[in-house]
Image (cartoon, rainbow, N blue to C red):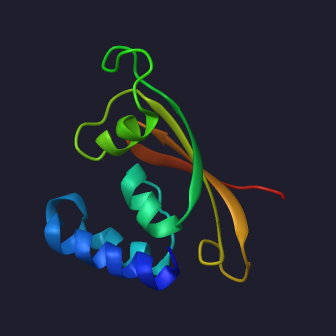
Amino acid sequence: MTPAERNSYAQTMFAQHPELFPEDRRQSILDGVVLIGMTPFEARLAGGAFTYRVVADKARWPAHSDPLKVMWAQSMQADSSEIWMTFKNSSQFSGDSDALFRVYFEQGRAVKIEKLKE
């Protein structure tokens, strides 16, 4: 998705599911900036294309569960799954063009954002 397409999609999601997108995070999503406290889906809307790693919570998910289902479920019912999403965009860090960064999630929320060296 282009940034404009991502922005349009985010606006549609805000309208369809306002309960999932707190007002205080919507502008950051539209600005393309991932914040601490965001869910993986919010981070996807903000950060754009990504790669990921998921270690599903064994108490909730059977072996070989679809990692994307595990990731997206965190918005509705967080669990102890471990999730890492890696993005590359020009909006996360002011003054940087196409910065590579990784977001770490615990209990369904971003807890750390780390700028990576390419």
Relative vertical location of residue 28 with respect to residue 80 in this rendering, above or below: below
Viewer-proximal residue, 107 or 54?
Answer: 54
Tell me where residue 109 appears, x and y as whole percent: 40, 46
> Image point 35% across, 38% down: which residue?
69
Q: Quadrant of the C terminus?
A: bottom right
Viewer-proximal residue, 37 or 6?
Answer: 6
> Image point 37% across, 51% down: which residue?
39
Tell me where residue 37 appears, x and y as whole percent: 40, 53
Tell me where residue 33 appears, x and y as whole percent: 51, 71
> Image point 41% across, 32% down: which residue?
66
Q: Kindly indicate the quadrant of the structure image that contains residue 99.
A: bottom right
Viewer-proximal residue, 105 or 54?
Answer: 54
Relative vertical location of residue 70 with respect to residue 8 in this rendering, above or below: above
Tell me where residue 58 appears, x and y as whole percent: 39, 15
Looking at the image, residue 95 sits to the left or right of residue 80; the answer is: right
Which residue is at the far right?
118
